[in-house]
Amino acid sequence: MTELFGLPLAVVAGQTMLGLVNGCFYAVLSLGLALIFGLLRIVNFAHGAFFMAGAFGAWLLQRYLGLGYWVAVVIVPLIVGAVGAGFERTLLRKLHGLDPIYGLLLTFGMVLVLEGGIRVMFGSSGHPYPVPEQLRGTAQLGFMVLPLYRVWVIAAALSCCALTWWFIERTRLGAILRAATEKPSLTQSFGINVPVLLTLTFGAGIGLAAFAGVLAAPILHVNPSMGSNLVIVVFAIVVIGGMGSIFGSMVTALAVGVVEGWTRVFYSEASNTVIFVLMVLVLLLRPHGLFGREGSA
Amino acid sequence: MKVLPLPPGFTRGLVAAVVLALVVLPWLPQFIYPVFVMKLLCLALFACAYNLLLGFGGIMSFGHAAFFGTAAYLTGLAVKHAGLTPELGILAGTLGAAVLGAAIGALAIRRQGIYLAMITLALAQMVYFLFLQLPFTGAEDGMQQIPRGRLLGLVDLRDDRAMYYLVLALTLGGLALILRIVHSPFGHVVMAIREHEPRARSLGYPVERYKLVLFVLSAALSGLAGSIKALVFQVASLTDVYWHLSGDVVLMSLLGGMQSVLGPAIGAAIVVGLQYYLDAFGGWVTLVTGIIFMVCVTTFRNGIAGTLTARVADDTRAPTQRYD
C-alpha cells in the first residue's frame, strides 16, 4: 500500500476529499455572507440557520409531499430565499442606517427563532435523508474509493460559486450590483431601485445557504442545530480571508476545509479547533485578512 | 418617545430598596426561592460586567461566555481537585478569566465593530471545544459535585443562607467596582475613545492599551460571576461556555438598557426568570428568547432603563450614545 507521511494514502486522500466537501459548504456559505455584507453591510448571523432550514425543507418535502431530492434542490432554495427576502423587507429594513451591530443582533434573534421553532415543531433529534438513487454508487480510483454523492456535492458547489462569480462580474445586473455596493446613493440617482436590489441580494444570499443545506442533507444528519456551529466556523473563515473579495473568500474556504481534513488525519484532537488557530495566526500576521484591504474595518 | 423625567433621587431610592429587599430575603423563603435569587445575582453581575465593554466602551464582544465558563471550570478545578478553600477558588477563577481576557482582548481589538464580534465569537467557540476535550471537565456531563467548602476555613457554605450572603456581598462589591470604573479618570478616557477614537489618539492617549484594560476588567468581572455560579450550583458545564450564553448576555444588556450601568441587571432578571419558567417547554425557551431579541432590536433599543430614565433622546443612532 502506498504511504504518505507514514499513513496509508487512501486515508489521506479520503480525508482530503471530506475536507473538500466541507470546504465547499464553507465556500457557498461565505459567498452568500460576503454578497449580503457587501451590499447591505450586515453580518448575517442567521446564515447557518437558513442553511439548516434548507436541509429541513428537503426533508419536509420528502416526508410530507413525497418529493425527491432533485425537486428539492431546485425548489427549496427558492422558497427559503423568498422567506429571507421577506425577512429583509419587513424587519431588517428597519435597521437601515443604524450601527451594523444591530443587524448582527437581529439576525442572531432570527437564529433563535428558527432553531427554537423547528425544535418545537419537529423535536431536536436528527432525521436521516437518503442519498438520491442516481448517486448512490462509488467509483474505484485504484488508490481510493470515491462515493459519487461527494463528487456531485463538490461539482455542484463549485459550479454554483463559478456561476455567481460570472453573474456578478459579467452581467449587467451584476454590474449594477457592484455599483450599488460601491456607492448606493449615486446608483440610486441613476434611477436604479436600490431598495429592491437589497431585498433581492439578501434573498439570493439566503437561497445560496439553503442550496448548501439541501446538498448537505444526505451527508449530515438533518437537525435543528446543524447550522449554528457551522456559521461560527464560516465567520472565522471570513476573518481569515477578509470579506473584500469573493474569489478570495472562496479559495480560503476550500483551503481551510482541506486543512481541517488533514488535521483529522494527523492530529484528530485538534480538528475542531484548527480553523480558529488559523484565524489567530492570520490576525497576528495580517490583521486585515489574507485578501482584505486596509481600512475595511 | 417623550417620557416624563423621574423625580430626583428616584434611582438612588430604587437601588436602596432593592438592596434592602435582597438583604432580608433569605428570612422570607416563602416568597422567593433563595437559590434562584443567587443565580439571578450571578447573571446580573455578568450582564453588568459585559455591558461595561458594550455600553460603556462601545466594544461588542460575542464571546463572553468563554470568561464566565472558564472561571466556573477553574473554580471547580481549584476547589474540587486541588482542595483549595472557596475564596481561593473564586480568586483562581477570576484571575484565569482575566488572563484569558487579556489574550482574547489583545487579538480582538486588532479589528473593530462586527469583525471584533465575529473574532470573539470564534475564539469563544475554540474555548468551548477545549473544555469539551480536556480530561478534567467531564465533557458533556460537566464537572459535578464541586464542594462549597468553608469560607476562610470558618463559615460553612453548605448552609444556603451563608452562601447567599457571600453571593450578595460579592455581587454588590462587583457592581460597586463597575460604578467606580465608570466614574474614574480611566472611565472618562474610555468614553472619549468611544466617542471619537482618532481624536483621543491625537491627544496622545494609548487607545489600544485603554481598550485592552477595559476588556480585561470586563472579562475578570464576568469570571467572578462564573466562579460564584460554580460554587452556588456546585457544577460547571458546557452550557456555561456555549455561545447561547454569550447571546443571552447581549440580550440582557440590550433589554435592560445598554446606556445605563445597572440597567443590564434588570435585563438579567427578566431573561433568567423567563428561562426558569419556560424551562419545561424545551424549544419554546429558544423561540421566545429569539422573539424578544428581535422585538428589542427593532423597537426597543433604549432598553428598560433607558426608557425609564428618559434621559436618552428620541434618536438612537449609535448603540452607545450616552452612559450615565
Image (cartoon, rainbow, N blue to C red):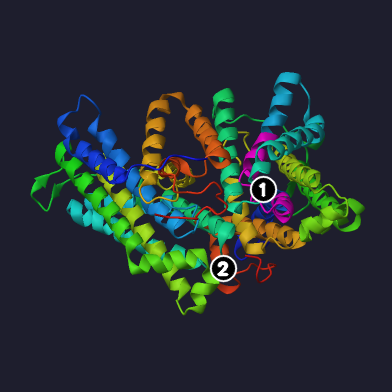
Q: Position of residue A169 (x, y in %)?
A: 86, 58
* Image position of A219 with respect to B224: above or below: above
**Tag in front: 1 or 2:** 1
What residue is shown with label 2? A283
Sequence order check: which comes first, mark 1 or mark 2? 1
Residue at (56, 55) in percent of width and height: B118
Q: Residue B151: x and y, percent?
A: 14, 50
> Residue type at mark 2?
Leu
**Residue B115: percent from left, percent from top:** 58, 59
Secondary structure under tag 1 reads loop
| The one of A202 and A135 positioned closer to us in this rendering | A202
Q: Is residue B225 magenta?
A: no
Find residue B263 and report its image quarter: top left
Chain of the residue on which disc 2 is drawn:
A
Range of the magenta residues? A32-54
Mark number displayed over residue A96: 1
Decide whether residue A49 is among the magenta residues. Answer: yes
Is residue B62 visible from the viewing direction of this image?
A: yes
Residue at image location 41% in from the left, 62% down from the top:
B215
Query: Which residue is pictured at 58% across the width and 31% down the height?
Result: A126
Instruction: Evaluate whether residue A266 shows in this view.
Output: no
Q: Which residue occupies the foreground of this view, B75 or B95?
A: B95
